[in-house]
């Protein structure tokens, strides 16, 4: 019964189910908005930026996977700290939106 009373906050639950924003969300949204009123040719700069963003994001994710593999192995303290610092840098880069061309 108590679970039904928690349903009154459905909006909050929907918010928590939404995936976190990715670094390419803004550029993707800008390219979609551009195509609503312009030709594909006019929006080419947005498509190129979105492609570049996805490529950069994939490279960062691949690097993250490799670092995680190394972190599970035998490392010196210096190596471990260096890899952990790089993981933090990658998370920071991925948390910022890719610049949208003007």
Image (cartoon, rainbow, N blue to C red):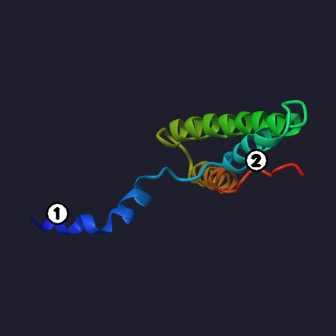
Give left or right: position of 47 versus 86: right
Residue 44 x, y percent position in the rendering: 87, 34
Q: Residue at x 76, y 47 (%)?
A: 30
**The quarter of the displayed image where residue 7 is located:** bottom left
Give left or right: position of 78 versus 51: left
Mark positioned earlier in the residue sequence (2 or 1): 1
Give left or right: position of 9 versus 19: left
Q: Secondary structure at mark 1?
A: helix
Mark drawn on residue 30: 2
Mark drawn on residue 38: none
Compared to residue 102, the image places residue 8 above or below, namely: below
Nearer to me, 77 or 93? 93
Residue 22 x, y percent position in the rendering: 61, 48
Q: Dot 1, crowdedness within 10 Å: few (<14), some or many (≥20)? A: few
Q: Residue at x 52, y 43 (%)?
A: 71
Residue under numbered circle 1: 3
Looking at the image, the residue that sits furthest to the left is 1
Q: Please identify the quadrant where the N terminus is shown.
A: bottom left
Residue 21 x, y percent position in the rendering: 58, 52
Nearer to me, 97 or 57? 97
Tell me, yes or no, whether the two marked residues, 2 and 1, touch with CB atoms within 8 Å: no
Nearer to me, 76 or 1? 1
Q: Secondary structure at mark 2?
A: helix
Residue 51 x, y percent position in the rendering: 76, 33
């Amino acid at each position: 019964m108590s679970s039904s009373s928690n349903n009154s906050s459905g909006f909050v639950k929907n918010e928590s189910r939404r995936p976190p924003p990715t670094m390419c969300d803004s550029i993707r949204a800008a390219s979609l908005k551009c195509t609503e009123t312009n030709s594909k040719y006019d929006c080419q700069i947005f498509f190129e930026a979105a492609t570049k963003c996805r490529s950069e994001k994939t490279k960062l994710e691949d690097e993250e996977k490799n670092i995680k593999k190394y972190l599970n192995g035998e490392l010196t303290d210096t190596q471990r700290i260096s890899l952990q610092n790089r993981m933090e840098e990658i998370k920071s880069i991925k948390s910022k939106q890719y610049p949208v061309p003007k």
